[in-house]
Image (cartoon, helix red, strand yellow):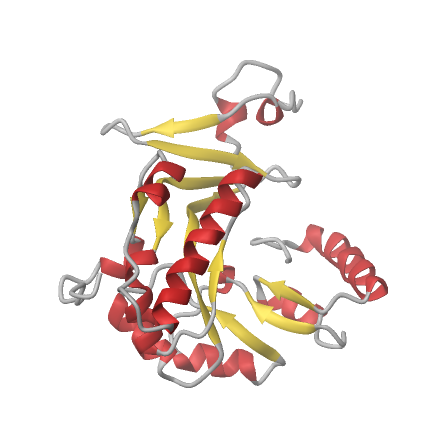
Amino acid sequence: ETPRIVSQKDLPAVADLKQLAVRAGIDGVIVNDLGSLRMFQDAEAEIWAGYGLNIFNPAAAQFLSSHRVSRITASLELSRPELQTLLQSGLAAEVMVQGPLPCMVSDYCMIRAARPGEADQCPGYCMGDDYRLRDQEGQAYRIISDAQCRTYLYAPYELCLMPFLPQLAAMGARSVRIDGQFYSPRQLREIVVNYQQALASLVAGGPTPGLNANMAALCPTGLTAGAYLSNPAANIGTA
């Protein structure tokens, strides 16, 4: 998967990534910006569009489909009616159902700004501790820095759409995604098993999958449906 943000100075690194991927014979790549999409156009690998492209409607999905993208990831900012419109367009789309919710990406290093040191030096504070930004309500937003010293700010709660799997299936979702980058191996394994069981029950016509106590225990910082329920008219009767 290519980075969320690719600037002009990042292009050589993405080009190196492409060459490594091609030599390794990978099956596919997830791109998060149009520049990376163009760079991988001549590769034989399958191309998927990540949520970094913020795909909001069938027109955007169709555009990407015409440029060798075989599967898109729906924007994390879609409400239920908007997601339904996208899924019912007939294009191959997947929905992120579990994982951290990104709020902001910035070149400003707030970790460096909050600590002492020379302005022209990077002490590497971000590598030595776990940093969070706390709002006036006491909610803690996780701060992550990448190899290019960009700052990623994540919401206090984990996204969890497990209770809405029946709705997503009815809307046409045929693929779901779990973003496990911040989970421990044990957490991720148990979360995946929970979703496997919920999906198996749904396919078998059994009890409607809901949010079980185990899922809540696995995500102690809290769970949210994110933008999915941002529209007050959203029907949550099957949850």
Up/down of 3 relative to 153, above or below: below
Left or right relative to 163: residue 42: right
Q: How many marks?
A: 0
In this view, the residue farthest toward the top is 116
* Among the 4 quarters of the image, the one containing residue 117: top right
Up/down of 103 relative to 69, above or below: above
Left or right relative to 200: residue 66: right
* Residue ID at (76%, 74%): 43
* Residue ID at (82%, 58%): 20
Residue 6 % position (x, y):
62, 55
Residue 147 % position (x, y):
66, 39
The residue closer to the viewer here, 222 or 135, is 222
Q: If the image is split into quadrants, where does the N terminus sit?
A: bottom right
Up/down of 228 relative to 157, above or below: below
Left or right relative to 21: residue 196: left
* Among the 4 quarters of the image, the one containing residue 137: top left
Q: If the image is split into quadrants, where does the C terminus sit?
A: bottom left
* Residue ID at (76%, 76%): 44
Left or right relative to 74: residue 206: left
In this view, the residue farthest toward the right is 23
The residue closer to the viewer here, 212 or 184, is 212
Residue 218 % position (x, y):
40, 39
Residue 111 % position (x, y):
51, 26
* Residue ID at (43%, 67%): 74
Up/down of 157 relative to 176, above or below: above
* Among the 4 quarters of the image, the one containing residue 154: top left
